[in-house]
Every structure is written in C-alpha cells, then in structure tokens.
Amino acid sequence: MRVALLTEGTRPDAPRAGDSWCDRLMDGLAEHEFRLYLLAGQGCTVETRPGRPAAVHELVMWGRRPPGRGPALHRRRQYLCAYRDLLRALVLPAERSSFAPGLYRLAELAREDGALPAFLASGHAQRALEAIWRSPGADTAAGQPQVCDVLVAGDLLEQCLRPLSAPWYGSETGGLGSADVCHVAGGGPAALPALVAKQLHGVPFVVTEHGLHLREQYRGYRAAPYRWPVRALLLGFFRLLAEETYRQAAVLTPGSEFDRRWQQHCGALPDRIRVVHEGTAAVARAAAGPEPEVPTLVWAGALEPGHDPEVMLHAFARVRADLPSARLRMYGEEGEPGYLAHCGAIAARLGLGTAVSFEGGPGGAGAAGIWAAASVVVFSGLAQGSPRLLADAMLSGRAVVTTEVGVAREVVGQAGLLVPPRSPQALAGACLALLGDHERRARTGLAGRLRAQQRFAVEPVVTAFREIYLELASRRHALPAAPGTRQQQRAQPFARPAEYWYLGEPQGVGEPSAGESPGAGAGPTGTGPTGGARRVAAGRGRGTSWAVGAGERPTGNGDRPEDRASRLFGAARVGAGSGAVGTAEPGALAEAV
Amino acid sequence: MGRREESLRSSAAMPTVHRAQSPLPGASRDPARLSGNPVRELMERYRGLCEQAVDPLDIAVGLEDAGLGPVEARCYRHADVFALAEELYARFPRRLPTDAPVPPVPSWRRRGGRALGSALRYGLPCAAPVVLRAVVPAAGVPLLALALVVSGVRPVRSAVGIRPAERAANAAIARRQRPGPRGPGPRGARLGYGLGVGLLLGVPVVAADPPGAVLGLAAALGMGSVEWSAGWLRHAALLSLGSAATLSGFRSRMRPVLPVALGLHLALLAVLSFAGLAALTALDPGAGAGAGLLSATVYRASALQWAAQAVLGLLLVPSAVLLRTARTAPAAAGVLVAGCGSAALAAVRAPEAGRLLCCGAVAAVLLPYAWLVLGRPGAYRPDPSLL
C-alpha cells in the first residue's frame, strides 16, 4: 500500500507532532511504501535512513515567497472571487460555509498556473483583504485593522496557503493521486494537500494529532507580536481549516482523550475518532533501581509560571515541616528569563536552604537518570497537553504525584495520585502520604509502570494504523465513479479487485481526461496502475478499457510485477494478522524504534 | 509575585489527597462560596483574557492553561470548558487595545550621518580628477585615464556596497519581494547601478570643460542629498504605515512626499553647483572677467549645463528610492542606460546635450514609476521576521 505521510516541520511558536513519531510508524509498517511530504522551513534538512521512506517531497514554508509571476489578467478575477470567498468565511459569521469552496477553488487555480503566492502578495489581494476585513459585521472590524496589519496578515495567509501550490497533486508516481492513503501527522497546513488530494482523486486520509495543532496555534499567537485583527484572522483560518479537516478526514487518531474532546468540539464525528496513544521507545527501558536513601522528591518541567514550580516549593516547605530529612530536586531549564532566580529567592524565603537543588536539564543520563534519583516524582503544572513526560516518569516505576489537568487523569488513572492545581496543601499531603508509606509507594510505582507499558507501547500503535490503513483502502472504490452518483456515495469494502494492485497499466492511459488538471493528466510513462486506472475511469467510464496484457506493463519506478505482488501479499499478511512486525517481540520492536 | 505567594500561603485547608476517581475540588476552587453567581468570580479573575479573546476557543485555551478542566467547569454549572468559555465570551464586550504599532524608524541623526558619509564617499573620488586637472593641465590622456579609473572605482564600489547592513537589508527585501524572474539578481542589479552612477558622475569630472567638471563635482557631493531624500522617504512611509488606517489613506499620505523630496534635492544641488561655479569664477574669472561675481557665476555655465544638472538630480533621486524599495532592476537599468548614453554622447562631443537627453528620457520614465511604487505599502515590510 502506498501511504503519503504529510507532516509539517517544527516552528518556534508552534510545536507539532515530532518527526520521530513518523520514523517509528514507518519502521513498524515496513510492508507499506511510505512517501514523506514535508512542509518545512527554510534551511530545514530532512534526515532519513536509507530506503525509509521511499521518497521525500519537500515544500518550503515560512519564509520568503517562492519566485513566480502573478496570474494573467483574465484569471485575476477568478483568483479574487475565490480569495474573497475565503476571506468572508474567516471574518463574517454568516459566511462560514464559503470557506471550503473558496479554498478548493484557490487550490484549483493554483494547480493550473501556480500563481497563487504572487497573487496573495499583490496589491489586488491586499485591497480585497482590507475591504472584507473592515466590512460591517466582520468579526475583525472592531479591532481597527491598520495598513501594516493588512500586510502582515496577507503574508501569513500566503505562507499558510502555500501547500495549495505544491506540485504534488498529479496521479503520476510521486503524486498524491497515486497514493492509497494519506496520513496527516500534526494537522494544520499539512492537511491542505490531503484535502486537495481527497477532493481531486478521492484519496482518503487519516489525521493524527499529538497535542492539537489548533490549540497550539491559540497558544502561540497569544505570544506572537501581531495585533488583534491579525490574530483573529489567522486563528479564524486555522479554526475553519481544522473543522474542514475533521469533516473530511476518514479517521482521526488523537493521542489522548483530552485531544479527542477538542476534536469533537471542533466538529469531528465521534464514530470517526479513535484514540491512539503515542508510542514511546521508553517502554523497553528497565525500571529505575533502588530508591535513594534520603526521601527525595523530584520535580520536572520548565521553570516558568505555567509549570508552577512555586507551588512545588510551597508544598515542599510543608513536607519538610513533617519530614525534615526530605529533599527536593528540581529539574528543568529556565523557561522565562529570571525565573530561576525568582524560584531561588522563594526557596530562601521559605527557609528551605540546601534541601532544594535546581539541577537544570537532565544532562547525559537523560530522563531515566532523573527518575532514578527520586523517591516520588511530582508534577505541579497548570496544563498537561502532552502525556510524554508523565508516561516517561511512570515507566521508571517511581510513584507519581501530579496536578489534575489536561491529560493527567487519563494517563495516571488509579496508578498515581492526582491533586488539584494551585494547591500546595494538597500537593504536600500527597507527597507525605507516599513518602511515609514505602509499601504504597512501591505498589503505586509498579502500577504506574504497568499502566504506561500497556498504553504507550509502540506495537499497539503500529497495529492500530495497520488496521486503519487496511480499512481505508478496502473502502475505496476500484474505479472512481462520477461525482454525485449513488455508487460514489455508497462505499463497499474490498471494492477494488486484486487486479487493481497486481496488473499493469490499462490501455488508453495517455489521454488526459476531462475535468483533470494538466499536471494530473501529464505523463503516460512511468505511472502506476492506480493512476492509470483512475484516468481511464474518469475519461471513459468505469472499467471500459481494462484489457490489460503482460506486454503492456510499464517497467519503471517500482512497478515491476514482483513489487506489486509483494505489496499485495503484504496486505494479505496484514489481513491475516501475521505480519513480521506483529510477531516481533515488543521489546525488540521498541529497541528498533 | 508577592500577592501570588500570599495567596498560596493562605490557601484554605485542603482535603489531604484524592484519587483520580474522586474528583473533589479543593475549597479554594469552590466558587459557590465566594459569590452567588460563580461565573462572576471567574469573570473578574480572567477579565483581560475574555476581553481580548478572538473567539470562545481562545478563552477555553486560556482557562485550560490556568488549570481549569471539565471538573472545574461543572462547578461553574457547565458541561465542559468549552461551554464555560462560550458564556464568558458572550458576557464580556470586546475591549481591544487600539494602539497602532509604530515601526522602528531610523533617527534623523542617523539619516544625516549617512547623507554626510555618502557625500564624502562620492565627492572625494570625484574631487581628485578635478584637482588633478587644475594642478597639471597638460597631464595628457594617460593621466586622465588613470584619474577616470581612480574616480570611477570608488563610486562603483560605493554604489555596490552602499553599506553592509543596508545592503543586507536591501537584499533581504529584494529576496522577499522581487525574486528571480523580475530581473537580474540583487548583486547584478547593484553592479549595474554602481556602473551607471560612476559613469554619470565620473565622465564630466574627467572629460568636460572646467564648469562642467565643477558641476559634476557638485552632483557627486549632492549624492549626500540623494541619500538623505531616500532615507526621508522611507521614514515617512514607515510612519504612514503605522498610522494610516486604509490603503488609500496611505497612498494619499505618500503622494506629496516624492515631489517634496525632489524639490529639496534640486534646491540643494543648485546651491552646491552655484557655490562650485562661484569658487571657479573667483579663481579663474575666464570670459566673464569684469562683471560681478554673481552674474559671472550664473553665466559661467550654459543653460544646457544647468538643465542637464537639474535632470541628473531628477534621475538620481527616484533611482535611489527604487533601489531602497527593492525595485533594483528598474533602478539599475535606468541609471545604467542613462550613464552609458551620456558617456557615448560625450565621446561624440555633445556631453551636455547627451546628458540632458539620456537622463531626461530615463527620468521621465522612472519618476512616475517611483511615485507609483512609493504609494504601495508592500514596498515597506513592517515585520522583518517575515522576510
């Protein structure tokens, strides 16, 4: 099966799903052919192991506009109409429904002449933005947008819409049209190519989000140096994009229940959501050794108000009042300038003296070294958007105390202690309860380790996505029908015959079909059977030219019969549940990941 | 921080510990004790967040970052944080900061320093051949060629490397706004611009008669005024960007800026030219000996020479402005064409007429173009991080 993996490179103000997760997925599903479509910043290099993935396609985001001329005079009006539809949806509450038509129309125009970036930077686009932005009834009219806001917002929109101009939408080898499934890791602009591929070629897509992209945008734009109208416009864009993505996605796989609630609130259908926890290689790590002789609390997190180290210091002062031998080791880099000194001053004022030590980053020993130094691990943050750190601490086998925020409840469950945030009294009580009871501490730690091993192993993740891919591929039609017909509306499992995967290119492939873009229809040579079948079907009706002979098979680019057969058999193994990855030892698999 | 610390110290007594399945909120989190309407207390606490939120989800993110979850939302009589955020969003009117961002503009001292430096960079190399010709009148062709090289290299280098920081900024703007197919790359365009300016300023000082050479020297010194005009135009544009509410308002503010800058430059150029000619007349009265210094100075240069000097001023200001608004290709092409044309016509013994013709034709094209470009706010990107 050919899987197009779409993801976005990291950006300082909006962290996304990590690339390592993609590597783990590709390693676990070695029977599938992955192609990586990366939206990266300038100067971002892609490091891939030989052969994994099969191909890397990169599009530069977040930087200077790609070179190119604007649209021709007779096409500018079409661009303006589509852009106005998009903008109206962003700022006028009554026009929200025009977002998707505007977006797809812009994508279509960009595919035809590639002039979208230049158009969005032109004076025509700026005037359209200004007129709609300041129109009566617009959400953003109250913010009194200025000329500089028009420029900044236009630039940001141009960067966000850049994937619409990517040269990825053909049916030839390497195009998204030749993929069987698109997998979007991270959401946001990375979902744009998947949306276009679905609209153009009917390729289903699955969206995986570990830490919701939309939520990260809200957080990031709060600290960004943009004025309110720019924030409102861009966040409106991301919100509508997320809604459209959730509406069109075949399956959504958030990393936690916490994210699932957000996706559901943003319009995702509950029956399309499957929580797939983020697998981590740390499940194979041995439990931490014996506890330190001195009762020690370890706190981990960035030294900033959001992680609330102050509460930890106050709670520790109460712990020390009952248990004078206790120590507190605080691990974490300074997240806000001067905050380390502020915490040190609080510790001195509370008379904690040398009982508290600020250790900085984890150093060479890594996170495992941090947990090994603890009797009890404590998290006092006000928000827990990602389960990574909590799960890592639980895998050490140490008892965990955490504030009940974000994903903490579902991650810790009954295998740890939850306390309300901003409450030093409750935090101190939980710490004392564990420090004073060795048996309870050991039992809680073991329960936490077992729970984390069960939830955050890599193998369940791989198995879940193997099933999802198979399910999506089985629901697709062998040959796409005309839009709006009953056959298209009613999906049937395994509607594609085996010949679709195995046999070569059908006759009459070279004719570009009506309704397809020039890019999509170009190049009869080197195309896989998928693209050829689609073109024939679109041009002549379903199955009219499936007279395929051995002599007509193309020979290029991985389309040899044995390659296709191996793909077919790989899919069969998946169906039988006896794949190579499925039979591997969990530990060995995690080690490999 | 002190207030926060006190609130932490004086937090009410909490139940010791509760398990994950026993969602008992702490006493300090029980809003019902604080007021009859629990949401009102929340509104006061998160007033800033609610007033500046772009939508309910913005408030929901803020509440979650502050530690509120579904359990706490139920205490406020809502099913989840989203419903609570929607109520807060509905109950608060938007109060948005109306202060417009002021883009960083260089100070007048910096602009003045740049202008002075530019006048010296262009003026000194052009003064060398003038002085050389005055001291050694029969230097011959080799000396003139050497002077041409000496005087020509400096303006070219000055124009190519206007200043490292400025060049970097211009290159960044050029990369952002006019990439690839719009014309030659920034380096090639700047080289062309430097060659053109070198020819326009260098040829008169080495090949024209004494009044022509003095006028060339005045034009070289006037490059300081060109630099100042370009900087002032950018300064005015950045200020307008921060204060103009609409694109048309920005255009209307920028409309008179270029004519005013041109007028100031022409006035200064006239003063410099007159001073130079007066010095020449005082040292060498020539044909006007016997008349007053004022009239002799005025008549020392012909009307054609005065007109050519004015047209040169009209050409250099818009080209420098275009160079600083990332339109490097038109600026370089215009100056290069004018310079080559002037040099070619000077070789056939019609220096002033050739200069007037070439510079006038190019200025007639560049001036309206620069005037239009200056009215486009896209020429000045307010956020360098976007580049």
Image: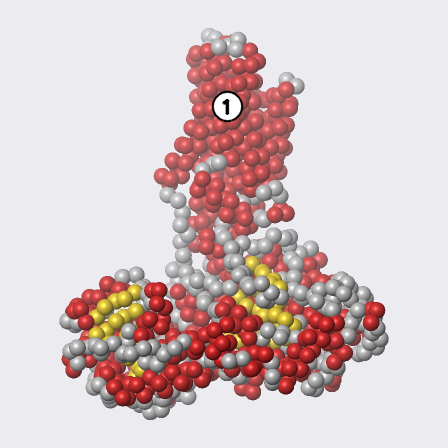
Q: Nearer the viewer, residue A147 or A558?
A: A558
Residue found at x 83% / y 74%: A548
Q: Point out the image quarter for the N terminus of chain A.
A: bottom right
Residue found at x 60% / y 35%: B334
Residue B53 location, quadrant: bottom left
SS class, disc 1: helix
Colouring mode (rainbow / by chain / secondary structure / one colour)? secondary structure
Q: Is residue B38 left or right of residue A503?
A: left
Q: Amino acid at mark 1?
A: Ser
Residue B240 appears in the picture as rendered: yes
Q: Position of residue B310 (x, y in %)?
A: 54, 28
Q: Position of residue A214 (x, y in %)?
A: 48, 73
Q: Which residue is mark 1?
A: B151
Q: Nearer the viewer, residue A152 or B24?
A: B24
Residue B225 location, quadrant: top left
Q: Nearer the viewer, residue B255 or B57?
A: B57
Q: Is residue B23 left or right of residue B187?
A: left
Q: Nearer the viewer, residue A311 or A414?
A: A414
Q: Looking at the picture, does residue A531 appear above or below residue B250?
A: below
